[in-house]
Amino acid sequence: MPVTIIINPISGRARTAAGRSRVAIARAVTERLATDAEIVVTERAGHAHDLARHAAARGVQAVVAWGGDGTINEVASALAFSGVPLGIVPAGSGNGLARELGISFRADRAIESALRGSPRAIDVGEIEQRLFVNAAGIGVDAHIASRFNASSNTRRGLLGYAHITVRAMVSYVPMHYRVTVGGVVADVRAVLVTIANSAQFGNGARIAPGAKVDDGLLDLVVVPERSRLVTVANFPRLFTGGVERVPGCRLAKVSEVTVEADEPMTFHVDGEPVQGGKRLHAKVHPGALKVLV
């Protein structure tokens, strides 16, 4: 059976013509490697998930996803538990999982690595029936993700993310949460509650420096707000791997966690914002996805 390559033609805010260029690159690599490949281009949100699900049902050898974190999430969610491995060609703003796995940012090299790579089993997280491979979160990171993904945002990449983050530090109002792990409840007014599968959000921002994608656990990071001055002073540590030095920060390896609040919560899965309810439950599925590296 052939390999399916799913291309998001506009990931990373690429121009429409980039789709044709990406198809040409994919075709050139597969022809050079004499690989029987089906190359398809997404047309709408959710299309990558549908394409990957149908490809897996047909019994393809692998599905390669070319796009940003949202595209990778769609394809990974379709392939989880199927045994069909995922290849990644990073082309987004954050590229969290690709960076964590050391995948090349040169498209031709990434495709070749996927087609010649060996499958590695990694864990998959789930929060409210939504799967994630990199990180999920509640709080300011979800707030930033919502602003970053808004159609009105014209700034992408690290600079765009940094701009929204700086503004959030002035305007964001933390909520009170009840975080339950192993029957123990912690009440906290938190800037963020991150549930990480890999160590980083993306762009090298390391929110959970001890996280590993294949340890069978998720890394819970809870950052309280003691005062806005303390939060602002320590905020860079949330992105530089120094989160454990933030006053009051709680880190734990968990297999599941429940977060409750008095108001409905916005959360994100791999950077995609989702409106949730007053209770969110997250858990890990060890080794549920194979990735070609």
Image: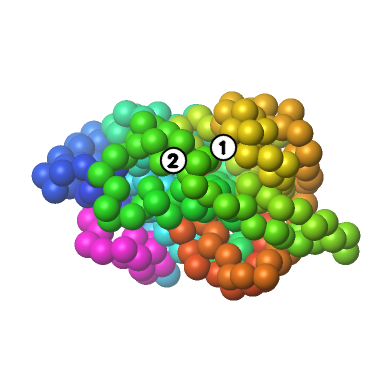
At label 2, which amino acid type do we have? Arg
Q: Is residue 85 visible?
A: no
Please report the residue visible at 28 percent of the width from the left and 55 percent of the height from the top. 151
The boundaries of the magenta stretch are 40-55
Numbered circle sitting on residue 200: 1
- Where is residue 241 shown, x and y percent of the image? 63, 28
Please report the residue visible at 76 percent of the width from the left and 53 percent of the height from the top. 188
The front one of 246 and 95 is: 246
The front one of 34 and 18 is: 18
Residue 49 covered by magenta stretch:
yes
Residue 224: quarter of image: top right
Q: What whole-number distance in Å separates the C-alpha atoms at marks 2 and 1?
A: 21 Å
Residue 181 covered by magenta stretch:
no
Decide if residue 198 is on the left or right side of residue 186: left
Single out the mark in the foreground, 2 or 1.
2
At label 1, which amino acid type do we have? Gln
Residue 288: quarter of image: bottom right
Residue 210, compared with residue 126, is above or below; it is above
Which element carries disc 2, helix, strand or loop? helix
Which element carries disc 1, helix, strand or loop? strand
| Residue wearing tag 2 | 167
Q: Earlier in the sequence, mark 2 or mark 1?
A: 2
Residue 197, compared with residue 283, is above or below; it is above
- Where is residue 251 shown, x and y percent of the image? 76, 42
Decide if residue 268 is on the left or right side of residue 48: right
